[in-house]
Image (cartoon, rainbow, N blue to C red):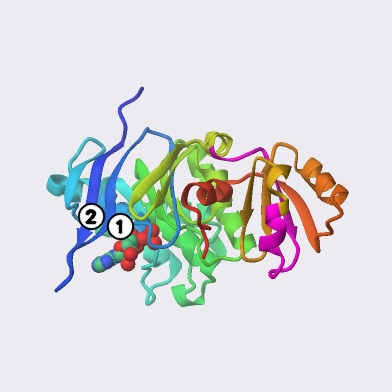
Amino acid sequence: MPEPVIRAENLVKAYRAKGRPDFVAVDGLSFEVAPGESFGLLGPNGAGKSTTMKMVGAVSTRTSGDLSILGLDPDRYGPEIRSRLGVVPQQDNLDGELNARENLYVYGRYFGMPGKECKQKAEELLAFAQLEDRATHKVDQLSGGMKRRLTIARGLINDPRILLLDEPTTGLDPQARHVLWDRLFRLKERGTTLVLTTHYMDEAEQLCDRLIVVDKGRIMAEGTPATLIRQHSSREVAEVRFGSQHNERIAAQLAGFGDRVEVLPDRILVYAHDGEGVLARIADAGLEPLTSLVRRSSLEDVFLRLTGRSLIE
Ligand SMILES: Nc1ncnc2c1ncn2[C@@H]1O[C@H](COP(=O)(O)OP(=O)(O)O)[C@@H](O)[C@H]1O
Ligand SMILES: [Mg+2]
């Protein structure tokens, strides 16, 4: 096992609140990230993902626990750690006064890189982010996806060993997400360590070698997407809708049709190895769903199983 580039042990963040007990946003997370790995934190809003990322990025101090980034303690070596990381925060913080190219250049200078090197690197990164034709556009003129790509490019200006991405594609349309995923795949292929948070299960499945499922500041499960699905769900899911007022009653009738049945407000999920088999049994029982489909289990099902809630509320 190579030395991990990130090691967190019992990491805790409690936010101080006046007149109220402290709010524990991160409640004892322990995880390690290996070099070159693509590691994810998957969890709903409020799970503590951004708080964790800020501590890993050495911009927020921990309340307790141990944390080591590239072998250094962020409490003592904040600037050293920050200079070796690339950060893509949840909220883009590009400089709206500057154009795309200038944003990259200025950021490089901020890291103390020589001007000539910044210029060269900026051109390289504009190409990587597929923004060459937008180089002179002000940030405000860029689409959401372009801004996100520019923020990623900016995070890469110092050739970081680790790139931290907090919800890289939240708010983007499907096409812009796919363009972004493609760029992140390329970084992964080049051996950059990626640490990303997301509440999109498909994003976690696509990009993460390994992930932790986080809820209310705690780890609910850890593993590769495939292992997590195997351990916590069936191979397939039959989704059937009988109309919101009937789902609850009919779900009781479907109990034996699969390994497990979940009733959501708008549909019933029947977990089974063979989803088509479930649909056949439903039809044999004389039940006629308004709609039905069979799909493979996903991380969304894992989350539902572990927490009884959906990732996106
Ligand atoms: N600066 C802060 N002060 C107080 N509470 C905070 C602060 N930042 C985040 N929180 C709270 O901590 C919890 C976790 O937030 P966050 O880490 O942003 O979650 P996530 O990124 O998973 O959505 C939330 O309940 C949030 O309201
Ligand atoms: Mg967040």
Q: Is residue 172 above or below residue 97?
A: above
Instruction: Classify mark 1 as within 8 Å of ligand 1 or not, answering yes or no.
Output: yes
Q: Which mark is residue 245?
A: none
Q: Residue at x 45, y 73 (%)?
A: 139
Which quadrant holds the N terminus? Answer: top left
Of 104 and 234, nearer the camera is: 234
Q: For the residue marked with disc 1, what is the amino acid?
A: Thr
Q: Residue at x 70, y 42 (%)?
A: 258
Numbered disc 1: secondary structure: helix
Q: Residue at x 40, y 49 (%)?
A: 214
Q: Is residue 73 left or right of residue 228?
A: left
In the rendered image, residue 273, in percent from the top left (x then y), is placed at 70, 36
Of 125 and 83, nearer the camera is: 83
Q: Is residue 244 left or right of residue 99?
A: right
Residue farthest to the top? 1
Instruction: Classify mark 2 as within 8 Å of ligand 1 or not, answering yes or no.
Output: yes
**Residue bearing mark 1:** 51
**Residue bearing mark 2:** 13
Q: Which residues are magenta?
A: 232-252
In the rendered image, residue 261, in percent from the top left (x then y), is placed at 64, 49
Residue 237 visible in the picture: yes
Q: Are marks 1 and 2 in contact (CB under 8 Å)?
A: yes
- Location of residue 69 (image quadrant): top left
Residue 246: within the magenta?
Answer: yes
